[in-house]
Image (cartoon, rainbow, N blue to C red):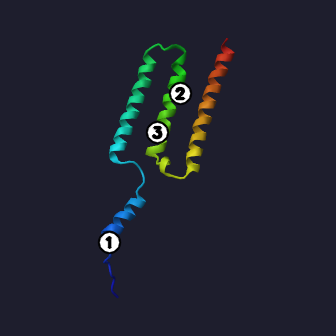
Amino acid sequence: MTTDTSHDHHPAETSAAREAEHHGATDAQYILIAVILALITAGEVTLTYIDVGPIFLPALLIMMAAKFITVVSFFMHLKFDHRVFSVLFYMGLFLAVGVYCGALLTFHFFAG
């Protein structure tokens, strides 16, 4: 009994197959995304230390949503997956923000 372990792959076919399998961002893009996320986080922290009045909560919610979409799109590869997964995650984001805002509004309503 012999086992043939030689593979006759052509370099062009192997490269094309790897390109077809690979989906996602490059290393440079991941570094850029990490820098952008760090800057948004720095903006959130800075916002908590300065008095911006009534735009405080909407600004934090917008920055939170931007970070959520970025992380889910690139680090969880939803940008490269089927559309159904993206819709499910974004519906979850919408529901969570809606519940949070609803809870805040009821506290404000019953406080005064």
The mark lying in front, picked from 1 and 2, is 1
- Mark 3 or mark 2: name the one nearer the start of the chain: 2
Classed neighbour count for the residue bearing mark 3: other residues with Cα under 10 Å, few (<14), some (14–19), many (≥20): some
Residue 51 or 24: which is nearer the viewer? 24
For the residues labelled 3 and 2, the Cα–Cα distance comes to 14 Å
110 shown above or below 29:
above
Classed neighbour count for the residue bearing mark 1: other residues with Cα under 10 Å, few (<14), some (14–19), many (≥20): few
58 shown above or below 7:
above
Q: Give the percent coordinates (x, y) of residue 20.
A: 42, 60
Q: Give the percent coordinates (x, y) of residue 36.
A: 39, 34
Q: In this image, 52 relative to 100: left or right?
A: left
Q: Which quarter shows the C terminus?
A: top right
User: What amino acid type should be assigned to the residue bearing mark 2?
Assistant: Leu
Name the disc covering residue 61, or none.
2
48 shown above or below 24:
above
Total marks drawn? 3
Q: Which residue is depicted at the point 59% across and 45% down? A: 88
Name the disc covering residue 70, or none.
3
At mark 2, the secondary structure is helix
Residue 9, quarter of picture: bottom left
For the residues labelled 1 and 3, the Cα–Cα distance comes to 37 Å
The residue wearing badge 1 is: 10
Q: Give the percent coordinates (x, y) of residue 70.
A: 46, 39
Q: Give the percent coordinates (x, y) of residue 107.
A: 64, 19
Q: Which residue is depicted at the point 66% across and 14% down? A: 111
Q: Which residue is depicted at the point 50% across and 38% down? A: 69
Q: Which quarter shows the N terminus?
A: bottom left
User: What amino acid type should be assigned to the residue bearing mark 3?
Assistant: Thr
Q: Which residue is depicted at the point 62% across and 26% down? A: 101
Classed neighbour count for the residue bearing mark 2: other residues with Cα under 10 Å, few (<14), some (14–19), many (≥20): some
